[in-house]
Image: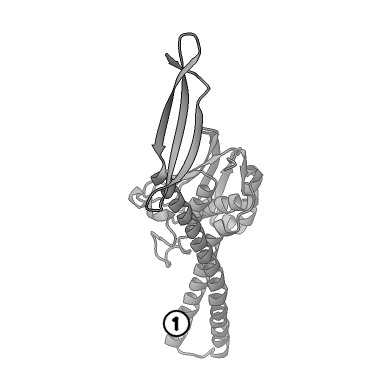
Amino acid sequence: NTILSGAEWKKEMCNRKKDGSLCWELQSISPIVDEHGKICNFISLKLDDTRRREAAEKLKEYAIELERSNRELQDFAAIASHDLREPLRKIITFGERLNVTLSNMDQQSSEYLHRMKNAAYRMDAFIQDLLKYSQVSRKPHAFESVDLNQVAQDVLEDLELRIAQSHAEIKLERLPTLEADPMQMRQLFANLIGNSIKFHKQGVPPAIRVKSSPDTDGRWRIVVEDNGIGFDLKYSDRIFKPFERLHGHNVYEGNGIGLAICRKITDRHKGAIHVHSQPGAGSTFAVLLPAKQSKD
């Protein structure tokens, strides 16, 4: 006797137990045929699917709650950014007026005023960076065909002044066209190239190379390498976390948000970002991005 291929009957059933709780079952019935090809019997299988169903429902509820919580946090970040920046602008404005009005103030008072304004500027930059980080997932654009060559050229134009001031030499090789969010691709390149310009060796002009190559599974590897100060790879996890810094504000400006935004962007594009570096020997950032975005 053999089981008749292709004739299996399947159904999901819900029954109520004596205690009133629901019990979900997966049932299948397969006919058995004899040597003449006639059905002579049936095999029935039942599988209790209750726990899996309950776990799936809990997971669905958790996902909905997590989405609601994230939305509230993003809204809070936007509102807080606006409300906090307004008093900071006043501190900066009145500080500048005091600087002009009290032109004959003593050295200590002048130093206090200078430090107050610098703290206000740093706080303002911190709030703006916080808002940028929250908006990566808060206001995403639709994926479309993006020419990364044009994106990189636009970023170099935006960074023109910093490139000139640092005497940076940037070699831009051929880049692919991908399905991506164009605004976030611009953020990605601006942060990576901007970091390479910022963290250059004292007295050594930045030399930056941007290149690409096809990787596995329909992905592209985008590489940004430089001759900068580098860092110890034991800190490689820290640099991708929001507001983590390896250097003090008095050495390099910024709040340590750029690479965290890069990771968030690559995650949204179902990609990845890796780094290889060592102190004094520059850094190489490799971004893996799919050529086509899945529809799920």
Residue 173 image point, x, y percent: 59, 39
The residue located at (35%, 48%) in the rendering is 233
SS at circle 1: helix
In the displayed structure, would residue 103 be above or below residue 119?
A: below
Q: Is residue 277 left or right of residue 178?
A: left
The N terminus: image quadrant: top left
Residue underneath mark 1: 111
14, 99: nearer the viewer = 14
Q: Residue furthest top?
A: 36
In the displayed structure, would residue 40 be above or below residue 176?
A: above
Q: In this view of the protein, can residue 199 be seen by the observer?
A: no
110, 230: nearer the viewer = 230
Residue 222 image point, x, y percent: 53, 41
66, 217: nearer the viewer = 66
Q: Is residue 73 left or right of residue 20?
A: right
Q: In this view of the protein, can residue 240 be seen by the observer?
A: yes
Q: Amino acid at mark 1?
A: Glu
The C terminus: image quadrant: top right
What's the coloring here?
one colour
In the displayed structure, would residue 138 be above or below residue 214?
A: below
Residue 46 image point, x, y percent: 41, 34
Residue 254 image point, x, y percent: 48, 63
Q: Quadrant of residue 81?
A: bottom right
